[in-house]
Image (tube, rainbow, N blue to C red):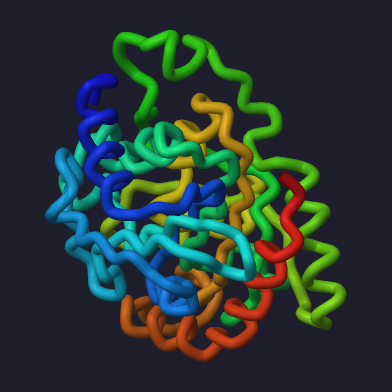
Amino acid sequence: MNQATIKEASNYIENKYTIKPTIGLILGSGLGVLADQIENPVIIEYKDVPHFPESTVAGHKGQLVIGSLEGKQVIAMQGRFHYYEGYSMEQVTFPVRVMKQLGIESLIVTNAAGGINTNFSPGDLMIITDHLNNMGTNPLIGKNDDQLGDRFPDMSRCYDQEYIEHAEQCAMELNINIQKGIYVGNTGPAYETPAEIRMLRTLGGDAVGMSTVPEVIVANHAKIRVLGISCISNMAAGILDQPLTHAEVMDTTNKVRENFLQFIKKVIDTLPQ
């Protein structure tokens, strides 16, 4: 995607609202309920935005919601795109490029993830402190556009340390038990084998999913500050003697809805800018 396509998509979106959003939200499986809390919403379906793919996964509505949340102007992706859907990494991360063009300075990325850390339980919320890119590719491969970001971006603090500390403080004030850990991004769509989970634990992973890493890499390339939150929707393969299903993911995210909403809204309300 070049600057012309980014500009075309952002112009289309910009013409639909009068506010100036500064915070972007990417809402994962079962977590799109946050967008329903946005006041005076402008809703734009992905299929109407030039060059946007369409979300094909259950639990992803496939629309942008723009408006006010806790007094802040936000643009939320109610559903995201995944590499396993057959989209290129450029397509998966295109919305992040568009958000940057729209003036987004901060990005809160959420996902449903499997727990690798055996101290975790389904329903836990985890602040992402770092990630392992286990997808075998990178959204920055190819010719670099220096106007979009550096050829070799530093990834040593791709999850903003001030935001991590802020999120911890918010959880403490709400008396919500919060975990912290390293997220592993796999391609999917198959869930991992028990042997793969043992390997990922050895490598230092605490949770595993099929998203987030590409968007965070591109956000870092674009110099957008990032906070990542995982909802531990199930324990990963081999930890509990039970099969893994997407229905379980959706069921768990539904059960923790109130904690998730309360937590993210407080984070947004007092987010350092």
Q: Is residue 144 left or right of residue 121?
A: left
Residue positioned 67% across, 70% down in the render: 118
Asked if one can make out residue 2 in the rendered structure from this viewpoint, the answer is yes
Residue positioned 41% across, 64% down in the render: 28
Asked if one can make out residue 192 in the rendered structure from this viewpoint, the answer is no
Q: Is residue 153 above or below residue 90?
A: above
x and y, in percent, of residue 81 in the image: 28, 52
Q: Is residue 58 left or right of residue 170?
A: left
Q: Is residue 141 above or below residue 92?
A: above
Figure quadrant of the C terminus: top right
x and y, in percent, of residue 220 in the image: 55, 31
Q: Is residue 116 left or right of residue 211?
A: right
Q: Is residue 196 above or below residue 266?
A: above
Residue closer to the observer: 262 or 12: 12
Outermost residue, front side: 18
Residue positioned 43% across, 12% down in the render: 147
Residue closer to the observer: 244 or 104: 104
The quarter of the displayed image where residue 86 is located: top left
Residue closer to the observer: 103 or 29: 103
Residue positioned 56% across, 72% down in the render: 232
The quarter of the displayed image where residue 168 is located: bottom right
x and y, in percent, of residue 256 in the image: 56, 85
Figure quadrant of the N terminus: top left
